[in-house]
Amino acid sequence: MHTRAGSRGCFWDSEELPMKSVYTLVSDIYQLMETKEVAEGVDLESAIDLFGENVKELMRNEFGGRKRDGRKLRMSNIGREDRYLWNVYNDVETSDDIQGHTYVKFLYGHLIEEMLLFLTRAAGHEVTDEQKKCEVNGISGSMDCKINGIVTDVKSVSTYGFRKFKDGSLAYDDPFGYVAQIKGYAASEGETRYGWLAMDKQNGHLTYLMYDENDTQAPVYDLIKFDISERIDHVKKLVEHPTPPDVCYGTIDDGKSGNQKLAVGCSYCSYKKVCWPSVRAFAYSSGPRYLTEVINEPKVPEINI
């Protein structure tokens, strides 16, 4: 048996094991793509039909007039930073509205999820509990699925974000609260193991990252052992407080320029102008850079926020 263990968690991307489990999931999908031969016992037509029905339902939900989720607190955001959740819950105004291209990106992510679940089935792995409703202390959500009995979130991410799933370091840098989100799904099922099937949407690389709260020797243990019920109770209290908590992240050095910029978690947040009124945006070739203190004026165009 060949396994590959990371220094921060358990993850697999191309090693083969003599059993169908999450340990072989990625290598089995790769083999499927290379040979175009579905696993023994798989009803290909049924898998294709299910994929088609799921995509049709996705498009119906997207364009059929279904109201968007109006809940302010839900399992998918309970892991976000306190100030962000306070802003959301208290209807703090922001001019940073979601634009059309961002909605395209969201839809693309949902389509990738359906594709990966089709490939998972075609490779001979079990997918159950798709969109199963979950609830912990009054906060609800829907899990993506279970793969081979493991509560699993399916993610399409950038090459940069993919590295955290690939090397197991997600718990160390989790600005979008993925760990708390999936802990909620798992807790509602009485499970202590959970994982992510992640795809680098630029290169097509796949990996599976699993955390196990019973593994007290794992370096990530101190970061994942928190009680999700306590986290939810904390959030429900803080959002009712009349004054907001501190900003989510402090500023960081912008290289050697002497300038200060927003941390990644703030730069992607729609409330950055609310929390940092003097922030300025500049159009670098690598993408917008949000500076809170400008000592040396950048030699690139400034963007109006």
Image (cartoon, rainbow, N blue to C red):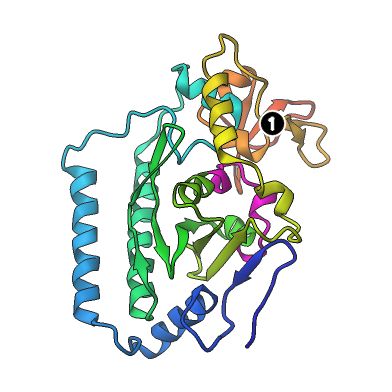
| Image quadrant containing the N terminus | bottom right
Q: Residue furthest top?
A: 242
Q: Secondary structure at mark 1?
A: loop
Q: Amino acid at mark 1?
A: Tyr
Neighbour tally class for label 1: few under 14, some 14-19, many 20 plus, Cα within 10 Å: some
Q: Is residue 96 visible?
A: yes
Q: Is residue 205 above or below residue 138?
A: below
214 vs 256, nearest the viewer: 214
What range is drawn magenta here?
Answer: 165-180
Disc count in the image? 1
Horizontal and vertical percent position of residue 161: 59, 55
At x 56% / y 86%, what residue is drawn?
Answer: 16
User: In this view of the protein, which residue sits in the foreground, 19 or 4?
Assistant: 19
The residue under label 1 is 249
Depth check: 131 or 65 in front? Answer: 131
- Residue at coordinates 55% horizontally, 86% vertically from top-left? 17
Q: Is residue 301 visible?
A: no
Q: What residue is shown at x 38% (from left), y 48% (from top)?
A: 106
